[in-house]
Amino acid sequence: MGLLVNTDGLTLEELMKKETEIRKKLSIASRVSSSPIVIDQLYQMIEDVKLAMLELQFKKSVIKDDDDDDFNDYLNIG
């Protein structure tokens, strides 16, 4: 969970939609010459969403790696 954006329980597609929404808000804020603090917060929100997407992809890869049958629980030395 990010500091500015609640990303708990969101799928990768939902996170991508959220990033798009924040980028649209950033575009509007940049056009209307918003405060640099507001623009920095929007950039931080984008980074929070990107981090959540990265964590989700990492968790999926770990689960996929755990399901591999190539790795066995025994070691044959001889």
Image (cartoon, rainbow, N blue to C red):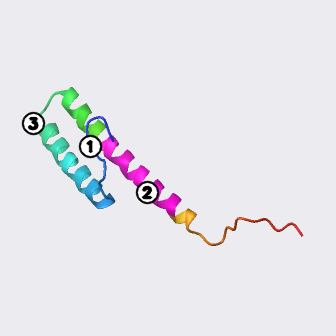
Kind of element beneath mark 1:
loop
Q: Residue at x 56, y 63 (%)?
A: 65
Mark number, residue 6: 1
* Amino acid type, mark 3: Val
Residue 35: x percent and y percent? 16, 27
Residue 21: x percent and y percent? 19, 50
Query: Label 2 belongs to which residue?
Result: 57
Residue 34: x percent and y percent? 13, 31
Camera-side mark, 3 or 1 = 1
Left-right relation of 60 to 52? right
Camera-side mark, 3 or 2 = 2
Q: Residue at x 30, y 35 (%)?
A: 3
Camera-side mark, 1 or 2 = 1
Residue range in magenta is 46-63
Q: Earlier in the sequence, mark 1 or mark 2?
A: 1
* Amino acid type, mark 1: Asn
Q: Earlier in the sequence, mark 3 or mark 1?
A: 1
